Amino acid sequence: MAIRTILHFPDKRLREKAQPVTFIDDEIRTLVNDMAETMYAASGCGLAATQIGVPKRIFVVDPAAKDEPSQLMVFINPEIVARSGEAIWEEGCLSFPSVNEEIKRAKRVKIRALGLDGKPFELEAEGLLAVAIQHEHDHLDGVLMIDRMSMLKRKMITRKMEKRAQRGNRNQSEAST
Ligand code: NI
């Protein structure tokens, strides 16, 4: 297992559309383990493969609160097949450090995917899990949370992240939060 580097906006690879996984082999199992380790190391509750520069349709989510035992969920070739209701949650993203903004999404979703064992499953989710599923699913299509904000917010955050990237280039030792 290894911790991979999480790409930060405006890295162009975050805009890549991920391709379906054709076969779940050791390479995919290692990738998924690394994704989980990377997510936990960054204290995130979700991570898509595109965020570590691997354009494959895989994401991991853990909706457990900090004082609860972990509940790692793996989604391979996920497809959101139903959405209902409306909910606004304050979201963050490991590719946008220190950005937290309210975003409107469906309140409930139904998702189909393959598990790490290659078996298809279907899941109905609401609350934080539904938000995380929609957020991570967007990543696989190169869609980022700023795309779901007002034009003004999007511009402000883009400017902030661009400045941050310039600072980061000058000082590689800057700790990422
Ligand atoms: Ni994200």
Image: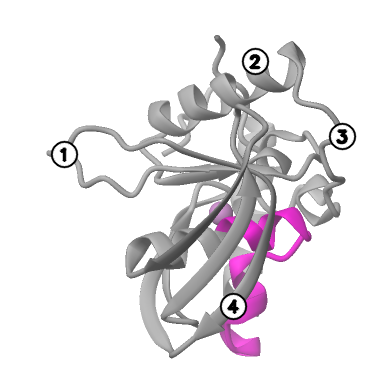
Disc 3 C-beta below 8 A from ligand 1: no
Q: Which label's residue is closer to the chain start, 3 or 1?
A: 3
Residue under numbered circle 4: 82
Here the colouring is: one colour
Q: Which mark is residue 30?
A: 2
The answer for how far apart the CA atoms under marks 4 and 3 are is: 24 Å
Q: Residue at x 36, y 75 (%)?
A: 89
Q: Residue at x 38, y 83 (%)?
A: 88
Q: Is residue 66 above or below residue 27?
A: below
The answer for how far apart the CA atoms under marks 3 and 2 are is: 15 Å
Residue under numbered circle 3: 22
Q: Nearer the viewer, residue 78 or 51?
A: 78
Q: Nearer the viewer, residue 175 or 128?
A: 128
The answer for how far apart the CA atoms under marks 2 and 4 are is: 30 Å
Disc 2 C-beta below 8 A from ligand 1: no
The answer for how far apart the CA atoms under marks 1 and 2 are is: 25 Å
Q: Secondary structure at mark 4?
A: strand
Quarter of the image with the C terminus is top left
Instruction: Find the magenta span and give its range.
Output: 136-154
Left of 56 or right of it: where is 151? left
Amino acid type for the residue under numbered disc 3: Thr
Amino acid type for the residue under numbered disc 1: Glu
